[in-house]
Amino acid sequence: MIDPDDAVMLLIDHQSGLFQLVRDIEQHVLRGHVTALAKLSRLANMPTFTTASVPDGPNGPLIPEIHHFNPEAVYIPRTGQINAWDNPAWVEAIEKTGRKTLLIAGTLTSVCMAFPTISALAAGYKVFAIIDASGNWSKMATDITMARVTQAGAVPIDTYAVLAEVMSTWNRADAMAFAAIMTDHIVPPYRALIESYDKAQGVQKNGRETRLEILEAAAGS
C-alpha cells in the first residue's frame, strides 16, 4: 500500500503537444486525472516534481492545471534527455526528499512514464505507475508497456486508487476536500450520490419538501 509519508509525486511530460498524440484515453479525462493528482499531492503535503521534454519545441508546455492547483510543485528542467531519470537534477531532487516510494505518471506512457519507472526501480525505489494519468499513442502500446513495467517490478494503479490509498479514511477533517477531487476530476457521478444523500439528510432534519396534506388542502379549497 502507498504510505503518503514516504511518497513523492512525479508528473512527467504532461505537455499540450504530446497530448495531441494520445489515443488510448480521452484528452479531457487524462487532463482531469493529472489535475486530480496535482491537487491530491498538495492536499497530502506530498513532494511533487514536474518536468517537460523540449517544451520549446513541438512537445509544447506543461498543461497549466498542474502548477495552478499545486503551486508548491517543483518544475525541474532538463537538457534534452528523453528519460527524465537521466537528468542528474531530477534524481538529486528526489533523493533529497529521503522518500523511497514514487508515484509516477507521464505522457507518453511507453516512454515518459516507463523509462524513469524502470530506472527508479533499478535504483531501489518502490514505484506505482499511474496508468490512467498517462496517455499513449495506442492501446497496444499501453498494454505492452504495462507488461514491461510490471515485469520490472512496478505496481500499476489508477488515479482513484491512488487518491483512496492516500486518503486512507473518511474519518479525517479534510475528507470532503478529497471527495471534491473525486467528483470534480475522477468520478463525476459520485456528485449525484452526495447530492441525494444531502437531500435525504435534509428531509430527516427539516421534513419533506412536498407535504401531501398541504397540497390536498390547497386542491380542496
Image (cartoon, grey):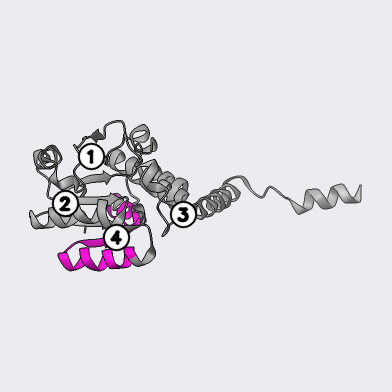
Q: How crowded is mark 1: few (under 14 residues within 10 Å), some or many (20 or more)?
A: many
Question: Residue 157 has which mark?
Answer: 4
Which residue is rendered at x = 43% and y = 57% of the image? Answer: 23
Task: Choose mark 3 or mark 1, whichever is in front.
Answer: 3
**Secondary-structure class at tag 2:** strand
Q: In this view of the protein, which residue sits in the foreground, 114 or 58?
A: 58
In the image, what residue type sits under mark 3? Glu
In the image, what residue type sits under mark 1? Phe
Relative to 109, is 149 on the left or the right? left
Q: Which of marks 3 and 1 is nearer the N terminus?
A: 3
Asked if residue 112 is positioned above or below residue 52 in the image, the reply reads below
Task: Choose mark 4 or mark 1, whichever is in front.
Answer: 1
Q: Earlier in the sequence, mark 4 or mark 1?
A: 1
Which residue is rendered at x = 12% and y = 50% of the image? Answer: 100
Q: Is residue 151 magenta?
A: yes
Q: In this view of the protein, which residue sits in the foreground, 212 or 168?
A: 168
Question: Residue 133 has which mark?
Answer: none
Q: Is residue 10 magenta?
A: no
In the image, what residue type sits under mark 2? Thr
**Secondary-structure class at tag 4:** strand
**Secondary-structure class at tag 3:** loop
Can you give x and y, in whole percent of width and height, for residue 162 in the image? 30, 54
Question: Residue 26 has which mark?
Answer: 3
Q: Give the range drawn in magenta.
A: 141-166
Mark 2 lies on residue = 101
Can you give x and y, in whole percent of width and height, for residue 125 in the image? 11, 54
Chief SS of the magenta region: helix
